[in-house]
Amino acid sequence: TSGTSGVDGISSGRNYYFNQSIPSDVSPYRQLADSPTGVAQQDVTTNLTALQQNVLVSEFLTPQLGVAVIPGGNQTFHFHFLKQASANNLEAYATIQLANSSGVAIGPLITTGVSTIGWVDAVTPSEVICDLTLTTTTIDPTNRMIVKIYVNNLDNQSRIMNWFTEGTQYYSFVVTSLGTVSGTSGTSGTNGTSGTDGTSGTN
């Protein structure tokens, strides 16, 4: 008999990268694409007044998604923020919204959970993870997705916040349930040896 099959490969949703350096074909958005750019790190500085809420950091638009179904599951955003001091009390979150092929918003606005911006040291950004969960949704394959990144200042004084993406470190991205692709199958085992021939019967 043949040997046993190899184990199944892992599954993973499609990654989309926040390409701040590349304007979208629709203004004022930047590009959110499934390939990183390879350009130098981008640093977006946001000045926050005391107790200022829902401040837009940057906004992005995907190309046409090219699928008829968004599978249900988590959409997990990996952001990289740097605040000026460990005691600064800042938060981040994102929103998503379907758009038509021209980049005009058509779907409901969906918001991630709000996450606290942490502290590593004065020069090292902290990774901030925000996520949301979608049910399986049927869409037009020409639809696109708008993503906007926001921050909140919970302190009673002005703060400065930096958001990082691109480069080889601190590239902000989102892991989606879209276009889930399986890994390759394991290799088959080797064939077993054949048994010996039986003896002939008597005449």
Image (cartoon, rainbow, N blue to C red):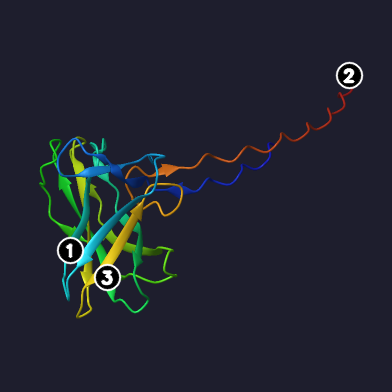
- Looking at the rendered structure, the kind of residue marked 3 is Glu
Using the numbered discs, state the Cα–Cα distance from disc 1 to disc 2 in whole angstroms.
97 Å
Rendering quarter of residue 163: bottom left
Which residue is disc 1 drawn over? Answer: 55
Furthest residue toward right:
202
x and y percent of residue 59 in the render? 21, 50
x and y percent of residue 79 in the render? 35, 58
Return the mark for residue 91: 3
**In what element is the residue under mark 3?**
strand
At label 3, counting other C-alpha atoms closer than 10 Å, the crowd grade (few under 14, some 14-19, many 20 or more) is some
Going from N to C along the chain, the mark reached first, 3 or 2, is: 3
Rendering quarter of residue 121: bottom left
Q: How many numbered marks appear?
A: 3
Front position in the image: 44 or 16 = 44
Using the numbered discs, state the Cα–Cα distance from disc 3 to disc 2 in whole angstroms.
92 Å
Q: Nearer the viewer, mark 3 or mark 2?
A: 3
- Looking at the rendered structure, the kind of residue marked 2 is Asn
Which residue is disc 2 drawn over? Answer: 203
Q: Nearer the viewer, mark 1 or mark 2?
A: 1
Question: Does 198 sit left or right of 25 as displayed?
Answer: right
Q: Examine the rendering and report whether any part of residue 138 can be seen.
A: no
Question: Does 133 sit left or right of 107 as displayed?
Answer: right
Going from N to C along the chain, the mark reached first, 1 or 2, is: 1
Using the numbered discs, state the Cα–Cα distance from disc 1 to disc 3 in whole angstroms.
10 Å
Rendering quarter of residue 108: bottom left
Front position in the image: 90 or 183 = 90
**In what element is the residue under mark 1?**
strand
Residue drawn at x 28%, y 65% is 161
Going from N to C along the chain, the mark reached first, 1 or 3, is: 1
x and y percent of residue 40 in the render? 40, 44
Q: Are marks 3 and 2 in contact (CB under 8 Å)?
A: no
